[in-house]
């Protein structure tokens, strides 16, 4: 299983970025997907998750109202649209995947140990 994340960059506060993560090697249509991030000197934290159906989403409080997670089963891709970026959003962003079988959505969706496969990360820097 491989995950390839892209779309990061250096942007000014208030800007938008759209991250992409292309997944190969597993049945994407039945996979739960998550985005996590790790800021310098901090532990990795949950950002957003989308259920395999694409009909349920869950966000960290820091992401609510500004970020949107979506998936395209035809492209085996999960997206993270980030709007109104702030300096505190600066981090390496990781996508993660797990087949939905054995994952209890409401209990496991924001726990990194419940995701089996991870991408390499893409750097997002928000600075003026």
Image: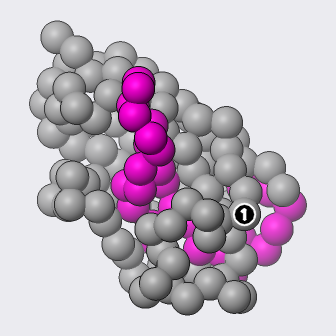
Residue 55 position by quadrant: bottom left
Task: Residue 52 in the image: state x and y as whole percent.
Answer: 58, 80
Residue at x-position 82% and y-position 68%: 26
Q: Residue at x 48, y 54 (%)?
A: 35
Please tell me which residue lies in front, 73 or 95.
Answer: 95
Where does the image place residue 92, in percent across and percent down from the top left? 48, 32
- Residue 100, visible in the rendered structure: yes
What is the number of callouts on the image? 1
Q: Which residue is mark 1?
A: 116
Stretch of the chain drawn in magenta: 23-50
Based on the picture, tell me whether residue 39 belongs to the magenta stretch: yes
- Quarter holding the N terminus? bottom right
20 or 86: which is nearer to us?
86
Q: Quadrant of the C terminus?
A: top left
Q: Label 1 crowding class (10 Å Cα cut-off): few <14, some 14-19, many 20+? A: few
Residue 64 pos. (x, y %)? 20, 61
Q: Is residue 17 left or right of residue 44?
A: left
Inspect the magenta stretch and tell me whether residue 49 lies in it.
yes
């Amino acid at each position: 299983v491989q995950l390839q994340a892209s779309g990061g960059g250096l942007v000014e506060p208030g800007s938008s970025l759209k991250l992409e993560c292309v997944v190969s090697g597993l049945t994407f249509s039945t996979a739960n997907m998550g985005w996590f991030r790790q800021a310098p000197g901090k532990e990795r934290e949950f950002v957003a998750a989308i259920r395999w159906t694409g009909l349920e989403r869950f966000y960290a409080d820091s992401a609510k109202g500004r970020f949107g997670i979506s998936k395209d089963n035809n492209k085996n891709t999960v997206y993270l649209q980030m709007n109104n970026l702030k300096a505190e959003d600066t981090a390496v962003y990781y996508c993660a995947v797990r087949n939905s079988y054995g994952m209890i959505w409401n209990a496991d969706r924001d726990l990194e140990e419940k995701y089996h496969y991870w991408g390499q990360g893409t750097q997002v820097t928000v600075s003026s």
